[in-house]
Every structure is written in C-alpha cells, then in structure tokens.
Image (tube, rainbow, N blue to C red):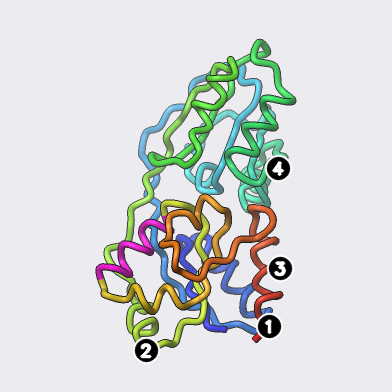
Amino acid sequence: MRIAVTRPEEDAGPLKAKLEAMGHEAVIVPLLAIRPRQAVEIPALPWQAVAVTSANGIRCLPASHGLAKFRTLTVGPQSLKAAKQAGLAAEAHGGDVTGLAAFIRANLDPGAGPVLYLSGAETTGDLEGQLAAAGFSCHRAVLYDAVPAAGLGVAENSLRAGEIDAVMLYSPRSAKIWRALVEAAGLSRQAGSVRNFCLSGNVASVLPESWDKKVPETPDEQAMLALLAREGRRD
C-alpha cells in the first residue's frame, strides 16, 4: 500500500522505515511542525513523578531541566524511548492520556508530592484536569507549540489521482487538520475512500462518519502496525 504518514518530521522517519520494512511505500505529509519554546524554566520542586504524553515533551526540555532523579511516566514506546535517551528514569503506562491518568490515580498518592506534566501548548485528554480532580497537585510546563500545516503538500496530487491507499493519524488534532485540509482541497470523497488508520476511537471520531476508519485494539503504534498488516493480507 501507499500510505500517507502525517506525523511531525521528528517521528515520520522511524515510522517510514517500519512501513517500508513491511513492504509499503510511505508518503511523508507532516501535519504539525514542532517549535520548542525558549527560556522555559522547570520549577525546582520535589516532584513525585514527571508525566509525559508525547516524545516532543522530552525533546523540548531545556538542557538544565534537573529531572533525572525523578520517576518519569510516559504513555508508550516512543515517549519512553525519548525519555530514556534523555537520561530519565522512565517507564510507560496506559497507552494514552486517559490510561496514564488512570495509572497515576491507582498507583500514586496525592499526598506524596506534586506531579510535573510536560506538554505542548495544545493537549488532548486534559491530564492536568484529570489529576486535579483526583486530588493531585499537578504543574503543567508548556515546552513547545505544534504549528499546523498550511496544505497537504505532495499528498494532494497523489490523493487526487487515487494514488494513496491509506493514511495514519495519531491524534485528534492531526485528524482534525487532515480533515480540514482535505475538505479545503475538495478531496473529501477521495479521503473517505482510503483506509484511515486511527490510533484510537477519539482520533476516529474527528473524521466524518462515512469515511473508512480503522482503529486498533489498543492505542499504540505496535497495534496500529499489526492492524495494518492484517488489512494488507485482505487485499
């Protein structure tokens, strides 16, 4: 299959390699560009844990973050890998924001200290709000902005010509941007007929009901690729 990869450039390369190893062709269409914020200061507090829901939250940390001694909780393999590469004592739980919040509520004590949440300016799932509702003191550090793409780039002509078989969407925001750009280009019919592989039901819910949507059993890339492999065998 010829698959549109919508992840930011930092994440698109590794995914492209995985898809090619599976025999697919990847078309890189970054829908978001990551822009680190400058002069961000991390409060020097006795954090009970550091929560991260995106690898970009690790990549955009200031050099003098001072977080290596704290327990770091990530949502999946990519954020876990980035955290370990940054020298953090990291572990992955939950698969997505809701799952991570559930893990924290079940395994951490609201009275044992504050939780630091590393995030971008726009987030999904409101981890901060979920933890606050459970009695945790949660400090959110905004480390980057994710700037939406202005167009579909190389994917526009390919989609128009029927040369895209599938698209991979990893967040509700990227799905929203994909839908808006497709509609602006007059390509809703074409986008609806390709297979839209969505990381979760929340991602899929952003797309029109009539579009062909595929959602893995669990919200992680390994499950996405397994679903893609099963779908490919049906062709």
Q: Which residues are magenta?
A: 174-184
The label on residue 50 is none
Viewer-closest of 159 and 140: 159
Left or right: 158 in relation to 64: left
Q: Position of residue 235 (x, y in %)?
A: 64, 86
Q: Amino acid at mark 4?
A: Ala
Quarter of the view holding residue 234: bottom right
Instruction: State the separation of the CA atoms marked 2 and 3.
Output: 28 Å
Instruction: State the separation of the CA atoms marked 4 and 1.
Output: 32 Å
| Marks 1 and 3, the one that precedes in the sequence | 3
| Marks 4 and 1, the one that precedes in the sequence | 4
Name the residue beneath numbered marker 2. Answer: 161
| Mark 4 closeness class: few <14, some 14–19, many ≥20 residues within 10 Å | many
Name the residue beneath numbered marker 3. Answer: 226
Kindly state the secondary structure of the residue where label 3 is placed.
helix
Please give the name of the residue rendered at 59% of the width and 19% of the height, measured from the top-left corner: 134
Establish if 41 lies above or below 219: above
Left or right: 61 in relation to 136: left
Q: Amino acid at mark 1?
A: Arg
Question: Where's the N terminus, which quadrant?
Answer: bottom right
| Marks 4 and 3, the one that precedes in the sequence | 4
Viewer-closest of 25 and 189: 189
Q: Position of residue 119 (x, y in %)?
A: 48, 38
The label on residue 92 is 4
Whether residues under marks 4 and 1 lie with C-beta atoms below 8 angstroms apart, the answer is: no
Please give the name of the residue rendered at 56% of the width and 53% of the height, measured from the top-left corner: 201
Viewer-closest of 228 and 234: 234
